[in-house]
């Protein structure tokens, strides 16, 4: 009975090892490499799109701040440039 148990365990472990090795080997075939490159390129494109979207949002916010200051007749000054609160008094 113990022999059958160990035989079953050995067969199961062997099958898992063979399956993992086969999957790993398929990653190095031309199809596997093409799939990997495609997924990497897709991730890069998505990262660039996300960056561009973030820049657009921030540019729109800045433009809104500048337009609000202009509508009030004030000079818009970026607080990062001079350490002030973002706007100077009337001209």
Image: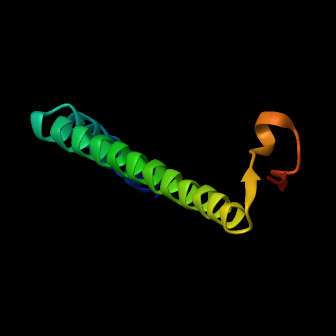
Q: Which residue is drawn at 87% across and 51% down?
A: 85
Looking at the rendering, which quadrant does residue 5 occupy? Answer: bottom left
Q: Which residue is drawn at 32% across and 41% down?
A: 40
Q: Which residue is drawn at 36% across and 47% down?
A: 43
Looking at the rendering, which quadrant does residue 25 occupy? Answer: top left
Closer-to-camera residue (65/53): 65
Q: In this view, does 53 lie to the left or right of 62?
A: left
Q: Residue furthest front?
A: 91
Residue 68, visible in the rendered structure: yes
Color scheme of the displayed model: rainbow
Residue 10, visible in the rendered structure: no
Q: In this view, does 33 lie to the left or right of 41?
A: left
**Residue 9 position in % (x across, y down):** 43, 51
Q: Residue furthest top?
A: 28
Looking at the rendering, which quadrant does residue 31 occupy? Answer: top left
Closer-to-camera residue (62/69): 69
Q: Which residue is drawn at 77% across and 35% down?
A: 81
Closer-to-camera residue (46/71): 71
**Residue 21 position in % (x across, y down):** 29, 37
Q: How many marks?
A: 0
């Amino acid at each position: 009975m113990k022999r059958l148990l160990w035989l079953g365990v050995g067969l199961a472990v062997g099958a898992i090892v063979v399956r993992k090795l086969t999957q790993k080997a398929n990653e190095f075939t031309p199809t596997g490499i093409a799939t990997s490159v495609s997924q990497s390129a897709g991730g890069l494109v998505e990262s660039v799109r996300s960056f561009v979207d973030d820049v657009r949002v921030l540019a729109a916010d800045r433009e809104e701040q500048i337009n609000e200051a202009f509508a009030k007749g004030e000079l818009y000054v970026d607080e990062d440039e001079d350490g002030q609160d973002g706007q100077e008094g009337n001209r």
